[in-house]
Amino acid sequence: MENKPRILVVEGDVVLAQTLASVLKTNGYDVGTARNSEEAIEYMRKRRVELVFIDSKVFVTRGAEIYERINETRPDVEVVVMMDSHLSRGRLRDIMRQGLWAPLCKPFTIDELLAVVESYTRFRAAALVIPVVHRHSQWVPDQKAA
C-alpha cells in the first residue's frame, strides 16, 4: 500500500507504546512514540504526522487542551483516542463532535488497530469508511445526523 500515513503513538506505558509501534512498523508504517502531550507536540513540530493514537489517560489529563494543541501544531492530523474506563461516553461524544477521528477501545486486537489505520488510509483516499467499534464496547455512535 503506497502513501501510508506517518503515525504517532502517545502512551505513558513505554512497553505498550513500543509494542504498538513495533506492530505498526512491521506492517510498513512510519511510527514515532511519545510518553505525554509535551513530547507529542514537540515530535509533531519536527515531523509530519497524519494519524495520532493517544491514550485516554493522557487525553483526560490534558483534555481539550491537548486536542487543540495538536490541531494548532498539525491541523491536518487525525486523532484516535485509545479508550478505557477513563473516558466517559458523554465526553467521548463531545470529542467526536469536535472532529476526533475514531475511538479505539482497550483492550483491542492488532486487527482492530490495523483496521483503524486502514480505514483512515481509505478515507484519505476518498473511499468509503466503515467505523470500527470494538466488539466489547458499550459505545454506539449517535444515529441522528449531526
Image (spheres, rainbow, N blue to C red):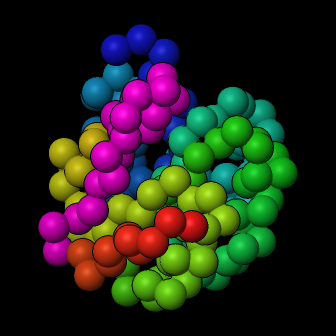
- 5 in magenta: no
Residue sticking out furthest to the front: 145
Q: Is residue 55 depicted above or below 27 in this figure?
A: below
Which residue is located at x 72 percent, y 66 percent? 66
- The image shows residue 96 at horizontal and vertical percentages of 55, 67
Q: Residue 144 at x, y = what percent?
A: 45, 72
Looking at the rendering, the stretch of residues picked out in magenta corresponds to 116-136
Residue 126, compared with residue 53, is above or below; it is above
The reply to whether residue 121 is visible in this rendering is no
Question: Where residue 5 appears, x then y in whole percent?
Answer: 50, 28
104 relative position to 6: left or right: left
Query: Measuring 37% from the left and 35% from the top, which residue is drawn there?
Result: 128
Number of numbered tags placed on the structure image = 0
Q: Is residue 133 magenta?
A: yes
- Give the residue drawn at x 24%, y 75%: 137
Residue at x 32% of width, y 77% of height? 139
Q: Note whether residue 99 is visible.
A: yes
The answer to whether residue 127 is left or right of residue 34 is left
Quadrant into which the N terminus falls:
top left
Tell which of 20 and 99 is nearer to you: 99
Front residue of 52/130: it is: 130
Tell me the quarter of the image containing the C terminus.
bottom right
